[in-house]
Structure formats: C-alpha cells, structure tokens
Amino acid sequence: MSNLTGRYINPLTDFGFKKLFGTEPNKDLLIDFLNQILPERHQIKDLNYSRNEQLGQAELDRKAIFDLYCIGESGERFIVEVQKAKQNFFKDRSIYYSSFPIQEQAKKGDWDFKQDPVYTVGILDFIFDDHKNEDELLHLIELKNQRCEVFYDKLKFIYIELPKFKKTQEELEHHFEKWLYVFRHLSELQDRPQQLQDRIFQKLFDTAEIAKFSPEERVAYEESLKYYRDIKNVVDTSREEGKEQRTLEIARELKKNGIPIEMIVKSTGLSKKEIEEL
C-alpha cells in the first residue's frame, strides 16, 4: 500500500533530484537551472552526462560519488550535488571532489596543462555555521589574490543555502527565485502556481507528477523519501554536543534506522569504516 500523499515529488530526495535533473530527456531542466547561477560567459547551450562515480587514488581506497556530473558543449565540467545535512569537513569534501574533473583532463603525451572550467554546485538543505547573513543565500567562491582580484577563473564553487529562501509565491520576482521556490516547496504543491507557468516549469511539473510514475518508480521514490525524512528527522533532533560528537550521533541513529551506509557517508562525511564500527 503506497504512503505517497502529495502530487509532486520532493526534488531534494536522491530519486527526485535525479528524476528531474539527471536524465537525457530532462537535461533542459538542469541547463535552465544552472544558467541562473553561472556567469554570462559560461552559459550552457547543451551538456552531456558523464559517469557520476570517480575512483580515488588506490592507496587511499576512496571513491567520490557525485549526484550529477556533466560536461558542457564547450568542455566545462559541472558537479551538482544536493546536501541534506551539515558535515564536519563539507568544504574539504567539495575541494576534494573538484580535483577529479581537473585530473581527468590530463592528456597523454605532450600536454600544456590547459584546463576547461570546473564548477562545483551545492544545493544545501542547511545553513553554513560561518555564514549567518540572512540576506546572502548564494555563494560564489573563486581563487583570489591578496587584493581580492580573481587569480584563476576556471575553478568555482557555488553554494545555495535553501533554508534562507523564504519568499512566498506572490513575492517571486526573478527566474532564479522561481527555481529556489521549486526546490523548497514543490512537494507541498497540489496545483501549479500562476507564477510558475513558464514552459520550463510546466515540463518540470509534468515530470514530477507522481501519478505518472510506473509502479517501480513509485517504490523507488517511496524508499528515497523515507531515507530523506529519516536523515532530516535525525539531524533536526540530534543534540548539540560538539561537531564531531554530533556527527557520530547522527550516523549512529541513521544506521539504527536502516539507512544504507553509502547514504550515511554522503550525509555525514564519515568514512565507510567509521560507520561500520559504530
């Protein structure tokens, strides 16, 4: 018996995010969203999906698994991730992940080290501890020199703190704000708001409608939704006992709730071995 009561999927679940943005027929949704946050010179006309698993160095026995990894028609690399919970070393993880699309550009033989741009995009379901400014939810991080001039233009990190976006339907002014509203409220909607009648959002609503899912898709979404709610519930109710202790407590609770270890790794930043030993 299905427990799904909403009309549209939650785009912050693993299944929902990949259903909307991770398939070839829907890549125009991803392109439209990314173009709202990319600089004018790197606007995307087309992109191709690449494998979303990158092997780390053998001696480290690590794997980097991205939600989405795609390459623009001009060679730009994009890692796009939804992050549901705070991690002790979230920024370190972002830097580590960005190293894979950099290294994969190495060419055999005579190579002059020229690189295509690499973007890491994080859609965050939390607020940074060190960025409390309520008006600032979009962060663009670049390599700059001591005079705050851009030193290197081809490596950028873009983070969106979703909880800071609190506008209502009636207050939406820009296309980017419409996307933020979709990420925060799509699963709560029963009708298509007047403010979201653009062609791209009509396609998104069509894709997100649960009634159109196959039985297999419904089962997969229900499972993904359960994991999302369990993670959110554990994170919201965990006690503040210092960052490291809090992360271990969250992982312990998620493991007890039957959340797959791979998802706990992604949600907490802990290693597989650390989680298995809890």
Image (cartoon, rainbow, N blue to C red):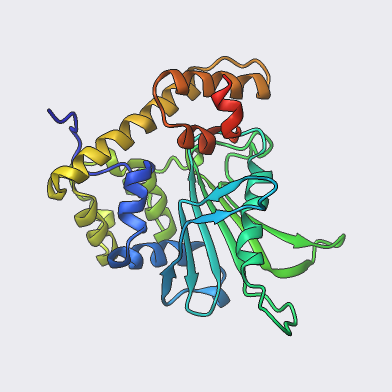
Residue 85 placement, left or right of 184: right
59 versus 274 height, above or below: below
Q: What quarter of the picture does the C terminus occupy?
A: top right
Q: Residue furthest bottom?
A: 110
Residue at horizontal 22%, vertical 55%?
207
Residue at horizontal 18%, vertical 44%?
216
> Residue 114 location, x and y as percent?
70, 79
131 versus 78 height, above or below: above
Give the quadrant of residue 115: bottom right
Residue 98 placement, left or right of 258: right
Q: Residue furthest front?
A: 59
User: How many dots with numbers?
Assistant: 0
Q: What quarter of the picture does the N terminus occupy?
A: top left
> Residue 228 location, x and y as percent?
38, 33
Residue 228 placement, left or right of 56: left
Instruction: Decide which of 38, 102 is in the foreground and name it.
Output: 102
217 versus 274 height, above or below: below
